Image (cartoon, rainbow, N blue to C red):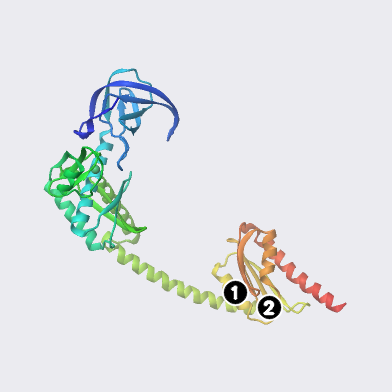
Amino acid sequence: MATQRLYYDDSYMRSFDARLEECVSAGPVGTPSGTVPVWEVVLDRTAFYPTSGGQPNDQGKIAEARVLDVRDEGDEIVHIVDQELDPGAVHGCIDWERRFDHMQQHSGQHLLSAVFQERYGLPTVSFHLGSDLCTIDLRGPEPTADVLRGAQKAANAIVFEDRPVNVRYGTAAQFAEQGVRKEVDREGILRGIEIERADLQPCGGTHVRSTGHIGLILLRRCTKMRQDWRVEFVCGARSARVATNDFHVLRTVGERLSCSPEESVAAVNKMAAERDAQFKSLRAALQELAEARAKLMIGGNRAGTNGQRVIAEVLEDENPELLLLLATELAKSEGTAAMLVHAPTGQLVFAQHPSTGNDLASLLKTVLATVPGKGGGTRNFVRAKLAEPVRSAEALETAKNLVIGTKQHSLERHGS
Ligand SMILES: [Zn+2]
């Protein structure tokens, strides 16, 4: 039997009396508080809105049972509840805060879509009412900041006029004659939502009775979504919540920067410029340090018997930036291979003067086969990051033995 949909003609009905026609066990379902047994309830009439047309379902209570979900199944509306209920008279009660929030967002969406289409020629191709943010997808050229600001202003002007929002019934042809925003080709009598002198749109959802109830409409980001433009918005109580959160973020940023929220952008720009300048002078200082240390290390390391100088070092307290600069400096000396690893981070750099003749790329592969990590490079320069920084010294020892071992081996071969 078809369920009578009370919300079609009175979207402000918060509670209602009905007759329970059917209650059947539907097996357990997963909820945030664990798996619970549920029942499917069908009433002769209901004010509960089922998930459909982009609007989420209502919640609330039927008798003592909590309504977890509401589904539109053809002519019937099925309520998913957490208790078995007896047939007969029942009282239903809707979670009004949730429903009214949906009515504000959904009505705001109609109004925004109408304004974007009428004033800027940007039709809405789809919309989404999320639990935090709502979006409409517009087709056409990118909406500029001026267009977004203009649409917000025009929509809010209609909100402040508190125009009536009416439910109208008619055929698709009748709606087309009356200038419906988006023509449909469905048969029979359709339900339309009219915002007086602004919009007419077929819709089965729940809406406010006048635009004043939408409350303030706030547009947020606009991003490209495939070929369309996705505009985020919030209405009514959500606008206040979002704006309050935004101000909290700004105030916190201002406090950290010791300035007012209004001055925070200038303060962040100044801070970024200072950071860039400090980074430059740090680089210069590290470069000087690398040159000086390289000189000392070369001086204290005579070339080994195999004709190459292998400098292997584990760095502990140094800035990891030094690793690359120091290795590069060391590799400028003829016959020198530098193998450096930064123990706290597991970063590793091997660099050599081309005259040494090792193949560092294949050497690194061999090292990483024993001590796991990711990296690569050329014959004369490689860098890597070890998966376990605690094995830095082990990786370095393996690499060093490979270089010395290869050379000695090839020398021995030469000698024989
Ligand atoms: Zn609607």
Between 196 and 29, the one lying in front of the other is 196
Viewer-proximal residue among 359 and 286 = 359
SS at mark 1? helix
Q: Amino acid at mark 2?
A: Thr
Q: Nearer the viewer, residue 290 or 15?
A: 15
| Residue 152 placement (x, y as % from top left) | 21, 55
Residue 344: quarter of image: bottom right
Count residues near mark 2 (Cα–Cα under 10 Å), then give few for <14, some for 14-19, many for 20+: many
Amino acid type of the residue tagged 1 in the rendering: Leu
| Circle nearer the N terminus (2, 1) | 1
Q: Is residue 318 visible?
A: yes
Say which residue appears at 30% left-offset and 21% top-offset.
Answer: 20
Left or right: residue 321 compared with residue 86 = right
In the image, is the residue at mark 2 within 8 Å of ligand 1 by its beta carbon? no
Foreground: 42 or 13?
Answer: 42
Instruction: Locate residue 287 relative to residue 297 in the image: left or right.
Output: left
Quarter of the image with the N terminus is top left
Q: Above or below — where is 69 with respect to 395?
A: above
Mark yes or no: residue 135 visible. no
Location of mark 1 (residue): 326
* Ligand 1 visible in quadrant: top left
